[in-house]
Amino acid sequence: MDVVVSFLFFGPAALPADHGTRTYHRAHRRRCMWYTKRTPVRGKDTDMTPPLSSSKLTQLQNLDAVLAREIRGQSQVLPRISSVIRRGELGLSHPLRPRGSFALLGPTGVGKTEVVLVTTHHIFGADRLFRFDMSEYQTQESLGLLLGAKLGDVGFLGAIRGRAAEGSLLFDEAEKAHPRVLDLLLQLLDAARLTVATGQTLDFSGFYVWLTSNIGSAELMSLQHSSEATLERHVLTRAQQSLRPEIFARINEKLVFHRLAYDHQLEIAEKFLARQIAFLGDRGHRLELHPDTLPFLVRKGFHPKLGARPMRDAVEKLVGDAVAECLLECRPACGTLSVDEARDCLVVR
């Protein structure tokens, strides 16, 4: 039987030119991978088995379908997210960097945060997403919150690394962060290693790094008749100027999310309504839908500039008010959810 010998070694030539310190080289040597794998050769085919469980492989195979079901109106970015996640989970990403990194750009309410939630929950579970609102890190002193403000303090990032070896780090509205905080993101993206106030160097190579930004989206309404390629170039240029080119260059995927059209809002309203009915059903309120209910909710919640958030609020308010009216009248909230045109609201009949 013929044998294929696989050899993988990341030597000094693979190191970034600006990271030639002695400490980095020692860490690099510790983390080099050098192994052999005996695999029978069958003509042109090699029977390689990924070192993952069957359930994990199924998760990765189903990721496209899960994202398409949960995220509406952004089909142009979902395959690129799935591609990075698959490479990271199959061990094909660079071992000295995060498993994957993303810059999610575009207007508010179009699904940037939602795609991070859905992806992380599907791959890792509900408790592996660690979110930072970068509007809280606009001063140089706020850097101590992340790395520890005094000797012996591990900071938020140290606490996260002590709790989990893998997951997602979401830096929301990254353009609002102080330049020193952006320097930290640069180090995280470049080497996946951070030193906290305790003196420990923490390894974040098991994490995905997500940056979101609304930068450049304010001008999109004036460019709404331009082609999608023109809009994307505008947003990418503005984001690169705001987040600094050296950070932008280290991100695996820079993804521009588009504004939601009316048809997409209709699908989103249907999803929000199904969630709300399931939520009320768990509390004993059995509701069915009249055909006029969904168009009424879209009419009340559709806002082209603000995206899906007004739709979510409209569904929660109008459906919740209809159920509350039943409960205040001491009658069960079970029946058909329909539109009362005279009162311009939803009622349970």
Image (cartoon, rainbow, N blue to C red):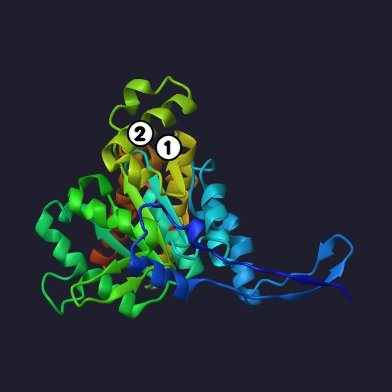
Crowding at dot 1, Cα within 10 Å, few <14 / some 14-19 / many 20+, comes out as many
Q: Residue 308's quadrant in the figure?
A: top left
Q: CA distance from mark 1 to mark 2?
A: 7 Å
Crowding at dot 2, Cα within 10 Å, few <14 / some 14-19 / many 20+, comes out as some
- Whether residues under marks 1 and 2 lie with C-beta atoms below 8 angstroms apart, the answer is yes
The dot on residue 260 is 1
Circle nearer the N terminus (1, 2): 1
Residue depicted at x 33% and y 63%: 21
Return the x and y of residue 130 as percentages of the image width and height.
32, 66
Residue depicted at x 42% and y 29%: 233
Left or right: residue 98 versus residue 152 is right
Residue depicted at x 34% and y 28%: 220
Left or right: residue 143 versus residue 222 is left
Up-down relation of residue 103 to residue 167 (above or below):
above
Q: Secondary structure at mark 2?
A: loop
Mark 2, residue position: 304
Left or right: residue 301 versus residue 255 is left
